[in-house]
Amino acid sequence: MEWFTAPEYWTGRLVFQRGLAAVYLVAFLCAALQFRPLIGERGLTPAPRFLGRTTWRQAPTLFRFRFSDRLFAACAWAGCAVSAALLAGAGDLVPLWASMLLWLAPWALYLSVVNVGQTWYAFGWESLLLETGFLAVLLGNDEVGPPVVVLFLLRWLLFRLEFGAGLIKMRGDACWRELTCLYHHHETQPMPGPFSRFFHLLPRPLHRVEAAANHVTQLAVPFLLLTPQPVASWAAALMIVTQLWLIASGNFSWLNWLTVVIALPAVRWPGDAAPRPAPGAPLWYEITVLAAAAVLLWLSRRPARNLLSRRQAMNRSFDPLHLVNTYGAFGSVTRVRHEVVVEGTDDDRPRRESTWRAYEFKGKPGDVRRRPRQFAPYHLRLDWLMWFLALSPVPARWFTAFVEKLLEGDRETLRLLRASPFPPGEPPRWIRARLFRYRFATRAERRETGAYWVREYVRDFLPPTRLS
C-alpha cells in the first residue's frame, strides 16, 4: 500500500524516538532510585500489600508473578539499559520485528511499575508516557517509512493533551476566564523552579497576556494540527515554544518535555524536503499497525466523550493498560501556598522551650533562604506528595508512615531528603509537623533579608509524635 508510509517525516520520527527514549531513561532512573522507601517491601506503601488487595484485571503488572526489592531494582535498571540503547539508536540497527520488541520492552516494564506505584504514580504524565510509548512500538525503524496512521495517532494524542487541558481550565476556576490565574500560579505551583519567582514578579498585565496566550495555544492551535503542511508544522512549533516557557517557569516532571517530544513528528524538517526512498512495508507489519490503530481509535471514544462532557475528568485512564487516556492540569489554581514543615527534637519530653530542627526536602520549599532548584524532568515523588498534603485538612496515611520512618532513622527514607538535622543512627525522639503560609519575597524584601520566601505560621498539622 503506497499510502501506508510518509517518508517526508523520516527526521520527525528519528527525533521523536530519541526524545522518547531519553524520557524513558529519566522515568526508569526515578523508579530505580526512589522505589525502595516508597513502595518497596518496607516502604511507606508497600507494593506487596497493594498487590494482595487488587487483581490482574485492575492492575496488570509483571510483579504479579513475584515482587521483591531486588527484582524491582533489576527491572528498573533493565529499563534504563534498554532506554539508553534506544537513545543510542539500537532500534535502527536491528530488523523491524526486533525493533518493535525493543520498544515494547520499556513499555511493558514501565506499565508494571506504574500499576504498583499507587499514589506515588497517580500523575497524568505516567499515563502519557505509556500511551506515547505504545505508539512508538508501531512507528517502525529505518527499514520502513513512518506509518501515516501512527503519525495521525500521535497528532490525535497531542490534540487531546492540549485541548483537554484548555477545556478543563475554561470549565474550572473562574480566574482562567478572567485571565488572572497567573497572578498566583507561579507562586503556588507544586514545585517552583529557579525562575518561578521572576515569573511571579512580572507585571500583572503580562500575566494576563500569559493566560490569554495559553488559551489560544490550547483551545485554537490544536485544530491546526489536522490541517495540511506547513500550517501543521507551525502549530506544533507554537506548542513547543509554549512548553519551553512552562519548562522555564516551573518543575513539572517530564510532562512538558514529553509534550515537546510528541509534537516533533508533526513538524516537516528541512532535511526531509526531498523524501528518501523507503522500501515497501512488509504485509505483516501493515496488518499489525492497522489492527492496533483500529483498536486505539475504538478506545478513543471514551476520552473523546470526556472532552465534550460538562463533567470532564482530568488525568484519567480508561483502561488498565493506559493505552488511551484523558489529560488536563490546573483546572483550579490555589491562591495561597501552604507548606508542611517537618521538625524533630531529641528532648525526652517536648516543651515550649524545646529546640525543634527542620528536615529539608530536595525540591519543595523549606528554608526561606534557599532558592528553588531545577529538577524536571526528574520527578521527586515525595516532594510532590508533600504539596498535596498541605492542601489536606488531616495527615495522609503515607505521611504517618513517613513520620514513623524518620523516628526510626530509616536510611532509605532519609535518602529522599536533602538534609536531616540529626546524625545518622541518632534519630529524634519526637517529630511534629506545622503548616506555614509561604509567599515569594518581594524585590525589596530579598535585598533586605537575602530570603527568597517569606513564611507565616498557620497551625499545627501533626502534634508531637514518638514511637510507641
Image (tube, rainbow, N blue to C red):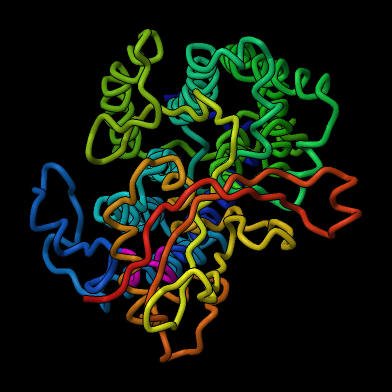
Q: Position of residue 95 (x, y in %)?
A: 41, 56
Farthest residue, direction bottom: 425
Count of all numbered marks drawn on residues in the image: 0
Q: Position of residue 397 (x, y in %)?
A: 26, 54
- Asked where in the image residue 259 lies, by quadrant, the reply is top right
Q: Which residue is depicted at the point 34% across and 20% down? A: 303
Of the 4 image quadrants, the one containing the N terminus is top left
Q: Is residue 352 left or right of residue 208?
A: left
Q: Is residue 32 left or right of residue 318?
A: right
* Foreground pick, 403 / 72: 403
Q: Is residue 101 left or right of residue 268?
A: left
Q: Which residue is depicted at the point 29% across and 65% down? A: 401
* Foreground pick, 218 / 19: 218
Magenta stretch: give its range: 31-38
- Asked where in the image residue 9 lies, by quadrant, the reply is top right
Mark yes or no: residue 27 visible. Answer: no
Dominant SS in magenta: helix
Q: Position of residue 140 (x, y in %)?
A: 45, 44
Q: Which residue is depicted at the point 28% across and 51% down? A: 118
Q: Is residue 98 left or right of residue 179?
A: left
